[in-house]
Image (cartoon, rainbow, N blue to C red):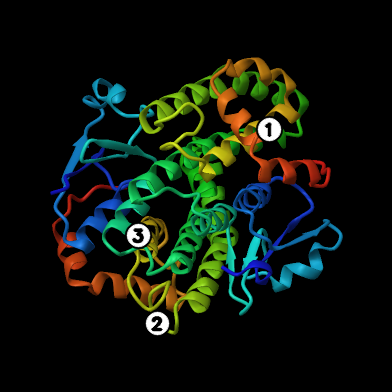
């Protein structure tokens, strides 16, 4: 029987999509969370000195998206054939496009500049990406509420996790994107995911 | 995937399109290699699913955007993406690692307009980022490879083509990078340059700015 261990910090960050995949699949795994003090002593155990890392049997995989894609494929949450998988990957990459400018906000130390960046991000930057995601959902969703093929894939889980962070910063940001809002609701309704969301550790990000 | 029913839309540049062209070449698959300039791009933009390129388009009009997603799809169809899920994941991890460094190079060095800042970032890139990256690639190869040349398992994958392509571009932009690699990647580069189908493509492809 295969064993799965996921190594990360005690936060959602770049590991949560994988935890959501495990939850959706009902797959047991070791959810290892290192705090900031413990991490330095484990750094050299990780292939690239970073986390998350997935240990699958004895193989170690770095890189959060590669890990998530591997797990999604293991548990049939990656798309039903090569073309569907490409559609899912395209949604994932398009979600990722909204990250660089988001990160700039967090790195800005000056409070006034930070607020400016935040406003600019939500007013100008984010809408472009939400519009793109809306287009992909319409094109790939086969008329349903999930991003691809009218069934749950890790694209929906990835969007769910990142949009949670965005909604935490601006609770109205999805208001003019009803399809994207409904997509989130559809994810939350899945019984195994609802149970996981209720029981998971609550962390700020 | 039937031959010329597939179209690949990108600028007449290497940049974010060349990896897919290399994969098509290595696979011996024909396709329509549609290239445009910055001046003619406005005619194509409204026809692209997200108004961006590269885009892969099928005979029925279905379009797939996002450069690495397109590359992965073409690689999978061609048997260049690993023989099982774990191998595919190892390949993805090498790709992601190379991509991380490419983004640093393009974001902080190549496109930096301020000359003083550019020089500073270039120095940092050469002495820190790139050195760490070559170490990281070496670690992944040690963990995943079962032969001398290729990153994962014992055959060519799109991760090999991505590293090859990325390093080529880097060497062209920053010739002093040559000495940083030692002999680590020579077997890989020799294998790729010696691959008949790839060589034929490399010999015939148009000269482009980058």
Q: Secondary structure at mark 1?
A: helix
Percent coordinates x, y for residue B51 in the rendering: 67, 66
Disc on res. A49: none
- Mark 2 sits on what residue? A144
Q: Is residue B110 visible?
A: yes
CA separation in Å, label 1 and label 2 = 44 Å
B4 or B33: nearer the viewer: B4
Q: Are marks 3 and 2 in contact (CB under 8 Å)?
A: no
Is disc 3 placed on a helix, strand or loop?
helix
Residue A164's disc number: 3
| Residue A40, image quadrant | top left
| Chain letter for mark 3 | A
Query: Which x, y percent locates residue B52?
Result: 67, 62
Residue B168's label in the rendered image is 1
What's the chain of the residue with tag 1? B
Give how far across and how far down residue A25 sits, in percent: 21, 62
- Whole-angstrom CA distance, mark 3 to mark 2, is 21 Å
Label 1 or label 2, whichever lies nearer to me, is 1
Dot 2: chain letter: A
In the figure, is residue A62 to the left or right of A140?
left
User: Of B157 and A189, which appears nearest the observer?
Assistant: B157
């Amino acid at each position: 029987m295969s064993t799965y261990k996921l190594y990360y910090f005690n936060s959602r960050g770049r590991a949560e999509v994988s935890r959501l995949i495990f939850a959706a699949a009902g797959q047991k795994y070791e959810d290892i969370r290192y705090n900031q003090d413990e991490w330095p002593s484990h750094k050299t155990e990780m292939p690239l000195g970073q986390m998350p890392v997935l240990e699958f049997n004895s193989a170690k995989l770095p890189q959060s998206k590669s890990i998530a894609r591997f797990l999604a494929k293991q548990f049939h949450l990656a798309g039903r054939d090569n073309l569907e998988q490409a559609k899912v990957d395209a949604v994932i990459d398009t979600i990722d496009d909204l990250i660089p400018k988001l990160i700039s906000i967090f790195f800005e130390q000056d409070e006034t500049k930070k607020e400016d960046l935040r406003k600019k991000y939500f007013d100008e930057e984010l809408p472009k990406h939400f519009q793109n995601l809306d287009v992909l959902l319409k094109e790939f969703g086969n008329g349903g509420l999930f991003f691809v093929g009218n069934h749950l894939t890790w694209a929906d889980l990835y969007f769910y996790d990142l949009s949670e962070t965005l909604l935490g910063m601006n609770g109205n940001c999805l208001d003019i994107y009803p399809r994207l809002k409904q997509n989130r609701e559809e994810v939350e309704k899945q019984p195994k995911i609802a149970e996981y969301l209720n029981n998971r550790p609550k962390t700020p990000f | 995937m039937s031959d010329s029913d597939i179209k690949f839309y990108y600028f007449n540049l290497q940049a974010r399109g060349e990896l897919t062209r290399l994969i098509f070449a290595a696979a011996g698959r024909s396709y329509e290699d549609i290239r445009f300039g910055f001046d003619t791009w406005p005619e194509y933009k409204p026809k692209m699913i997200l108004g961006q390129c590269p885009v892969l388009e099928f005979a029925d009009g279905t379009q797939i955007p996002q450069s690495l997603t397109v590359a992965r799809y073409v690689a999978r169809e061609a048997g260049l993406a690993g023989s099982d899920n774990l191998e595919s994941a190892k390949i993805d991890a090498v790709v992601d690692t190379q991509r991380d460094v490419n983004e640093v190079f393009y974001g902080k060095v190549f496109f930096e307009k301020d000359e003083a800042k550019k020089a500073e970032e270039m120095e940092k890139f050469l002495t820190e980022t790139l050195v760490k990256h070559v170490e990281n690639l070496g670690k992944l190869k040690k963990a995943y490879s079962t032969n001398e040349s290729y990153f994962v398992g014992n055959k060519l994958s799109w991760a090999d083509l991505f590293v090859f392509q990325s390093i080529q571009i880097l060497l062209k932009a920053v010739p002093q990078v040559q000495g940083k690699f030692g002999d680590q990647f020579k077997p890989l580069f020799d294998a790729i340059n010696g691959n008949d189908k790839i060589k034929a493509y490399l010999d015939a492809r148009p000269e482009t700015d980058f």
